Amino acid sequence: MIALLARLRGTVRRHAERRARVRRIEAGVLVLIVLSVLVLMADSVPEVHRRHGPLLSVLEWTFTALFTMEYLLRLWLLRRPWRYARSFFGVVDLLSILPVFLALLMPGLHVLADVRLLRLLRLFRILQLPFYLEETRHLRQALVRARRSILVFIGVMGLLLVLLGTVMFLVEGPRNGFNSIPTGVYWAAVTMSTTGYGDLTPQTALGRFITGCAILLGYGIIAFPTGLLGAEIFAGVLQDRDATATGCRCSCHRRPPTAPPDP
């Protein structure tokens, strides 16, 4: 029996490792993920839940059964299953199916109905699909290369928020709603992000001038990390292209001849 299961696993593994079939399987999983999220969203609407509750429950259990089978098959077919189980996507897959079984085993815990929202974590599986791996790799490498600049940027942002919050606390004061420095920091974060909820508005001329400066500063701050990550991603793409073109004799990869040095 064990030998039969081993041969069966080897046969299934050989078929599953074919690239075309992997793409079809991942595309099917993606469709199931999107459909399960749509069912979860529809179930959160009270009127839809009252009218179609039994149907949504059947669909929920159907998706749970399919995702459970997929998770167990991955553990069975992979050569190092515990490495997958401890990985980010393995934990996401487990958390997306575990709450439903917990709600079945412990129906008295009504809080588990809200824990079902963990199924939304399966949306992260989109990043694992083959046709997204290259793009996510470039983004991950860009974040690693720019990590020091990002940390410096976060530190400077924190200092600016505290500075602006303190200044507005001193300028406006409790009489205009700025009761403390943390309240001023909250106002600075909302203003510099150009959100502007309107719950805290400066009343003095100096406070309004500082608000205008903070808004202009916020536009520049938003553009900085975007440009930084964009430059790092572009540099990574160029590096990969140069590495691919090394040794290639195609005309599209040929470099222009180097000019001779001046005598």
Image (cartoon, rainbow, N blue to C red):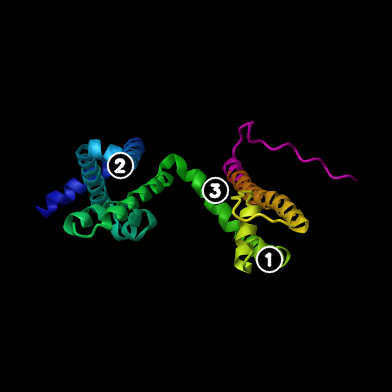
Taking the image as drawn, is residue 123 in sight? yes
According to the picture, the residue beneath numbered tag 3 turns out to be: 138
Q: Is residue 130 left or right of residue 47?
A: right
Residue at image coords 18%, 59%: 106
Horizontal and vertical percent position of residue 32: 31, 39
Residue flagged by tag 3: what amino acid is it?
Answer: His
Horizontal and vertical percent position of residue 239: 61, 47
Instruction: Say which element carries label 1.
Output: loop
Would you place residue 181 above or below residue 98 in this image?
below
Task: Looking at this view, name the residue that lies furthest to the left.
Answer: 1
Residue flagged by tag 2: what amino acid is it?
Answer: Pro
Query: Are discs 3 and 1 less than 8 Å apart at CB?
Result: no
Would you place residue 169 above or below residue 130 in this image?
below
Residue range of the region highlighted in magenta in the rendering: 241-263
Task: Looking at this view, name the residue that lies furthest to the front.
Answer: 175
Nearest to N terminus: mark 3 or mark 2 = 2
Give the image quarter of residue 250.
top right
According to the picture, the residue beneath numbered tag 2 turns out to be: 46
Q: Mark 3 to mark 1: distance in Å? A: 47 Å
